[in-house]
Image (cartoon, rainbow, N blue to C red):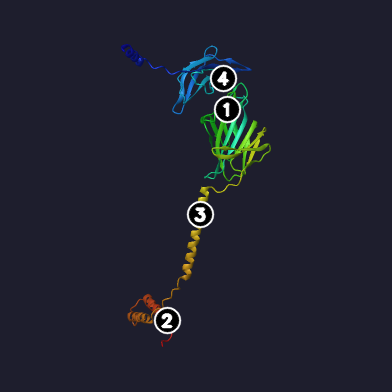
Amino acid sequence: MAAWRFALLMLALAPAAAPAQSRVGGRVMRVAGRDTLPVPGLAVVLHRVGQRSQGPIDTVVAGSSGRFEFRFSADTTAAYLLSARYAGIEYFSQPVATNPSRPDTAVVVIVADTSSTAPVTIRQRTLLVSAPDESGTRTVLDWFVLSNPGQLTRVAPDTTVGAWGTPLPPEAQNVELADNRMSQFSPEALVFRRDSVLVFAPLSPGDKELMLQYRIPGSLRRFVVPAERVTDSVFVMVEERNARVAIGGFVAADSQMLDGRAFKRWAGIHRQPGDIEIVLPASLLSSRQLLVALVATLGAVFALLAWVLVRRRRRAAPIPRLRVPDPSFLADAIARLDGRFKGREAETPAAEWAGYQAERTRLLALLASTLATRGPRS
C-alpha cells in the first residue's frame, strides 16, 4: 500500500508533458536566370498573425546553404508565415503548416534583385458594380491581379513615381483600399492622384492582388473605365439586371450570388489599352431623395392651400362702411372756432388768423356735404 501511494505522489510531482511543437524549415533562394541560388546569412523571421495579436515571434539566420529551421508551439487560431529581408526589401512566404505530426520543412523563401524597369502587367481585372444605395450612389470594387513575370523585383525609380500605376474613372469618388485580406499591399503603399492610383511598394516576381473600392454617381448612365492591356481576362459583374458591357469581346455568363445578392457576370478580353464601357439603367430616386421630394411637395401643397384660404377670406370679408360725420358735431366745431377767434382779428397773429379762416371753410364745406348726403328727413 505504501509503494502504491509513493507512485501516485511521484506522478503528481512529475512535470506535465510539454505540448508537441511545430517544426518549420526550408531555404532562402534567389532567382538567377533559369536557376535559383541559395542565399546564406539572411535573417529569417517567423511571424504570427492572429485576431488578438500579431507580429514576429522568432528569428534565425540562414546557414551557408540558405537553410533555416524553427520549432515553436503553434496557436491553432493563428496563421504563421516567414519573411527574409534582401536588398532592403522584405519577402514573405505563404502561410506555413503547423501540424506537429507533419513538419513543414520544404518552405522556400524567394528573394530577388531589384530594377525600376522590370515589366509589370495586369494579368486579370474584375469590376463589380452595385445598384444605387440609399445615398443615390453605386459602389465599385476594382480588383487587379498584377503580374511580374521576370526575375527582378520592380521598385519605384524615385519618391515621386510609383513602382506601378494605372488610371481610374474620372467619376470615381472616395477611392480607397477595399480589403486588407484580399489586397497584398498596405494602405500606406498607395497614393491617389486625381484620377489615378500609384503603388510605391516593391513588386516581386509572381502575382500580387490589389483591390480598390470607390463610389460613382447613381445617375450615371455610362460608366467608362480607362483600362490598360490585360494579358488574361476581364470580368464585369453588375447587380442591375439591365446593365451591360457596351464594347466588343464580352459575353454574358451565369449570374453569381455575392453576399445574398445576384450579380450578372460578363467575361471578355482586353488585349489593347482602351476604355471599358458599361451601360447602366436609369436609377430611381433613392429613399433620401424621395423623402426630400415628398417634403418639398407637401410644402408646396400647404402653401397653395394657405393662399386659397386667404383669398376666400378676402372675398368673404364685408366692405366697411365709411363713417359719415355727425352734422351737430361739425356745427359745434364751427361754433367753438368762432367763439375763440370771431371779432379778434386785430389781436390775432396773421398766420393763426389765416389758419382759423381755412379750418372754418373746411368745416363748413364738410357740413354742407354731410347734409346733402343724408337728404331731407321725413
- Residue nearest the viewer, comparing 12 with 213: 12
Tag 3 residue: 296
Callout 4–callout 3 Cβ contact below 8 Å: no
Report if residue 161 is visible in the image: no
All told, the count of numbered labels is 4
Rounded to the nearest angstrom, the CA distance separating label 1 from label 4 is 14 Å
Judge whether 272 appears above or below 223 on screen. above
Rounded to the nearest angstrom, the CA distance separating label 4 from label 2 is 119 Å
Give the amino acid at mark 2.
Answer: Thr
Tag 2 residue: 370
Give the amino acid at mark 1.
Answer: Lys
Which quadrant: the N terminus? top left
Q: Circle 3: is it few (<14), some (14-19), or many (20+) Cα within 10 Å?
A: few
Q: Which residue sits furthest left? A: 2
Q: Circle 4: is it few (<14), some (14-19), or many (20+) Cα within 10 Å?
A: many
Rounded to the nearest angstrom, the CA distance separating label 3 from label 1 is 51 Å
Going by the image, does 179 lie left or right of 376? Answer: right
Q: Residue 208 carries which label?
A: 1
Front tag of 1 and 2: 1
Front tag of 4 and 2: 4
Give the amino acid at mark 4.
Answer: Ile
User: Which of the two discs, 3 and 1, labels the residue nearer the N terminus?
Assistant: 1
Mark 3: secondary structure: helix
User: Which of the two discs, 1 and 2, labels the residue nearer the N terminus?
Assistant: 1
Rounded to the nearest angstrom, the CA distance separating label 1 from label 2 is 106 Å
> In the picture, residue 185 is in which quadrant?
top right
Tag 4 residue: 110
